[in-house]
Amino acid sequence: YLFAEPLHSAAVSRIEDVEAAATALSDEDTVLIAINVTRQRKHIDKRLDQILKQHMGELKRGRQVRNPKLSQARYRLSRAVLAQSLKKTFAVHDIRCAAAAQGRKISNWEVAALAKLDYQQREKLEAKLEGADERRVVSAIVARHAKDAKTMIENAAIGVFPK
């Protein structure tokens, strides 16, 4: 579990013995709550909401992305990343390194073809790019991937990934 979060127990559970209560109290990510079940449900719900807001904060609307700074993984990521983006970035880097090892210079257009990168799916462009415009756009994107890969590798040496 180098980059993964540690396994968590159930989100909500019923505590039935002293040992389980002691374990829950010692865990920083757990709140132990006693509920008098003879009370009215609306009062219990209201108080539970207050307690959870106090310990969890206000929940934001929309898709929630876990903040990497709050990670409990052994090696934390410096920012949230998409695995597909990393795959493209390091595919470009690997192709360039392989070409350099063979002593040949390779164009960004060839790198895009070898990495099977498809940039025709860009929705911003109403008309398909052709010829020199297409080569220029693809070349700029491949150059950015190569620069990002180099930066990530350099920063990994000092313990920061990805950046």
Image (spheres, rainbow, N blue to C red):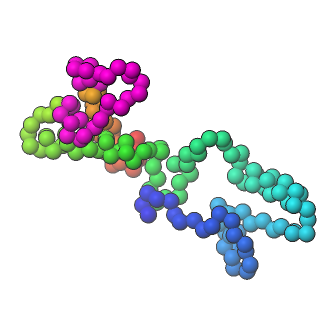
Which quadrant would the C terminus be assigned to in this image?
top left
Instruction: Locate residue 97: give its quadrant.
Output: top left
Quick check: 8 above or below 153? below
Question: Residue shown at 9%/37% (left/top)?
Answer: 104
* Front one among 82 and 103: 82
Which quadrant would the N terminus be assigned to in this image?
bottom left
Question: Residue shown at 74%/78% (left/top)?
Answer: 16
Residue 119 shown in magenta: yes
* Front one among 163 and 47: 47
* Horizontal arrangement in the rendering, residue 83 relative to residue 43 (left or right): left
* Horizontal arrangement in the rendering, residue 14 relative to residue 98 (left or right): right
Percent of width and height locating residue 155: 36, 44
Which range is magenta? 108-137
Quick check: 64 above or below 12? above
* Front one among 122 and 47: 122
Using the rendered image of the protein, determine whether residue 136 is visible from the camera's viewpoint. Answer: no
Percent of width and height locating residue 18: 73, 79
Percent of width and height locating residue 69: 53, 48
* Horizontal arrangement in the rendering, residue 3 relative to residue 14 (left or right): left
